[in-house]
Amino acid sequence: MLKRVMAPEGSGKTTFLLETLLERAKEKANIFVIVPEQTTADTERAVLKLCGAQSNDFIEITNFSRLSNLVLRSHGGIARRFLSKTDQKLLLASCGQALAGSFSALSVRNLGDFAEETQSALRELRLAGIGKEELAALADGAELEPELKKKLADLHLLQNSYRASLRGRFDDPDEEAEHLAKLLENIPFFRDSYIFIDSFWDFTAPELQILAQMLRQAREVMITFCCEKGENPLFTKGKNAARAVLGLARKYQIPTEDFYPAFPEKENEITFLKKNLLHPAASFAGEDGSVELYACKNRFEEAQFVADKIARLVSQGAKWREIAVLSRSGDEDRLFGFLFDQYGIPHFSEERHVLAESAPAETVLRAVQLATGDLRGENVRQYLKNAILPISEEERFLLKKYATTWNLSGKIWLDGKDFVMNPDGYQLPDRESARELAAVNAAKHKVFDPLRALSLALAAGKTEEKAAAVISFLSQTGAEEHILKEVAEKKARGEWEEAGKIARNWNQILERLGSLVRVAGEQELENEAFSALLALALSGEEGGAVPPGQDIVMLGALPFTRQSGTKYIFITGFNSGSFPPEKNGAGLLTEREKEELGKLGYAFSAGVEAQMEEYFLFYLGLSFASEKLYLSYSTGGEDDAGDALSVIGKRVQKLLPHLQPTFFDAAATVPKTRESAFRYLCANPEKERADIAFLTEYFKNTEPYRKRLLQVLSGKAFLQGEFSLQKYLPYEGKDVNMTYSRLETYSKCRFAYFAQYLLEAKPLEKAEFGFNRVGSFVHEVMEKMLLRLSAEGKKLAALKKEELRAMNEEICREVLGRFLPEGAGERMRYLAESLFRSTLLLLTEMQKEFSVSLFEPIFMEKKLSDLGGYHIPLPDGK
């Protein structure tokens, strides 16, 4: 028996399913509940609460990903040699290289892009129901466009080569889902059981194959579908899924019964939007305030709005777990995470970062690149900056500083000899510089002796020997020991999710090295080819994690989030792109080609279904919000930019005519505690305000806020321009590549921000003059300028152009006499003269940016030991 439960989101489908499950549980028969992986934990809690602890004996709650292991544990065959995704990618790359001359449509110029694109295309075809037989038939068919036929023919050729490469090394190349479907044809695993399937919007072709076997074996299969009676195009996706399952039932002559539950919903703005999303002619006859629209000046301020609103909701009694922040793509997760950390908001991000950008992966990739001869200066500096090294942070900093001062590259790093140049550049060494040089050389040997050993070991021909050399290098540098120690420290502080992420990343790197050995272990590879395959193995995203059950805010992308039990939903970026966002690049198969294949009956989203994707996903976002929906967007400026709203945004305003954007005011909240005062400081741009200046000085000298303040000053620097929002991540540690001063850190160099962001200066272009000498010159000119202005009672913003130019040149000439080395040639003196223009431009930009600068001396008579209950004076005297 097939039971289809069809109703819109939030109309009681899951409740109806659980009520039926409770009745079946009384029979003590085998029951299977299949839900998406994200909702497994929530479903387990709901079933346990409903049916009691004894239900664990006969109720299995799982998902399609874990179903294969569930069957194989009972019936054997689990110890098969499956290919991991990395194995597949590497094997496809090897086959592509061998077939490069035979392709008519595919290009193998970039091995990494080729492997990613073909793997993605083959997976897409497989999920749409196009297997090897169908692929061959389509490539030979006459009804397709010539270019599409060429692509399919190339993919068929590649797939044949791929399958031939598997023989004797792996078992059959089917994915687990197809393998499970074949097993179930002969294994009555679901005989006489009850199966409940909930929260899926549609099914892939392999999942439909499994469903076919379930229908044949089970006593009853109940599936929920997000749709309703009639042909409402909003629910095309759910309706098509319901039709596909009905087709399976008819094929195997399974009786079918349909249910349309409708639980009453309170009539508010959210419900009205859900029901009338495709009919903007109607309008809501009331103002209950369940939907709010906010406009912010930029993305950073939009993140501030969300963080501030969440803090207020929780202070009014909301739970963290009742709140979710959904963007169109998830690309803003790092920005939101930074602000949430500043506000003390616990959160879980669904965004997966690139594995190759993690410190362990950078250690492996950069080490192999350096050891195989890629000793460019920038590569060395990135290695010193990001890799896990057996040195202290102070030693790391000294090496980075030395490398930048002398713009070092080449074999000098691996020759085993000591450096002899003065760490301070072109000037006579003294005792301090001699001590620093000794420390630099000691650090050099700690870092580069293992690299030299790796370089020798990589001379081995076979891939497995080269991989073993990499593992030995990681052991020699103590990378694994460092990571295990970091994991233990995170756990000791109760940071379990962060500890788990670090451990998963490390294990993934080891697993991908294993994939490289499995696929190409016996091959004799040149170092360049090995480095390319290693980079390919470590490409792609970090491993995902199931959302934890703690009381935390969910942060994710709208298309992929399954939220349960939420009350407050924030949908950000409401005026940009579309739901879901357009992908970067069309991929191997264009949208037109997918539509062409969709017309032949394969499960590609095309036609009306594709057009309704944006509305359907927004509808789901609405449905998650049981109490309140917050929509926000950034205008990119100060003015009312209602016209900047997307098409769907304008439709929402048409349905709710009274819904006008509220412009978020970052300075609207008066802080009353030390923590809220810090948030107040973070949220306000630096202008001529006594309260901001006072708080800045206070938190500079107050632990533990000092470090957090420096993060804000360096990463955000109170920026208002869109161009600089890419720099929102906090500055961490001493990094000579990010400063313009001999003092080396943002905490001490007060002009680094202007040089880095406003001038967009590139210091390495002036390496001839000595990079940290340039920084010191700029720093001293700026400092002397502001000190003179302070002594004369003048303000930088009030200086006329001619006066600023004259004062700048006078101070530059004064400072330049001490900075140029004795006996400097005319060429170097001419180069130094160009600095006059740079400092003048820097001062001019400072005039534009701030009327009273944080960098001018501020004298405060008040002292503040505790901000508890302290009222910060605002300009209007309130």
Image: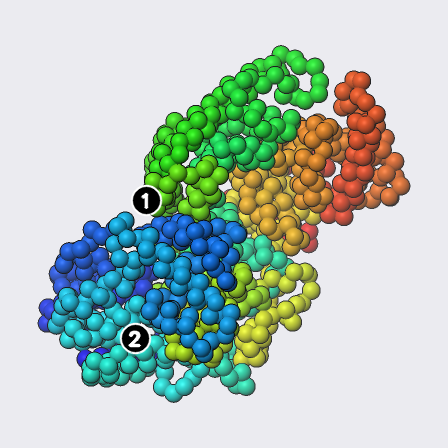
Image point 50% across, 36% down: which residue? 369
Which residue corresponds to mark 2?
224
Residue 557 appears anywhere in the view: yes
Quadrant in the picture for residue 753:
top right
Image point 76% across, 23% down: which residue? 819
Q: Quadrant of the C terminus?
A: bottom right
Label 1 residue SS? helix
In the image shown, does 251 or 293 lie closer to the viewer?
Answer: 251
Q: Are marks 2 and 1 in contact (CB under 8 Å)?
A: no
How busy is the neighbourhood of tag 1: few (under 14 within 10 Å), some, or many (20 plus)?
some
Image point 52% across, 28% down: which residue? 396
- Which of the two discs, 2 and 1, labels the residue nearer the N terminus? 2
Residue 873 appears anywhere in the view: no
337 lies left or right of 31: right
Q: Which one is in front in this view, the residue at disc 2 or the one at disc 1?
A: 1
Q: Is residue 709 above or below residue 56?
A: above
- The spot of residue 194 in percent (x, y) is 17, 72
- The spot of residue 203 in percent (x, y) is 33, 71
Q: Which mark is residue 620?
A: none
- Disc 1 residue type (three-letter): Arg
Which color mode does the image show?
rainbow
350 lies left or right of 104: left
583 lies left or right of 862: left
Q: Quadrant of the N terminus?
A: bottom left
Q: Is residue 48 above or below residue 615?
A: above
Which residue corresponds to mark 1?
518
Q: Is residue 647 above or below residue 675?
A: below
Residue lying furthest top in this view?
431
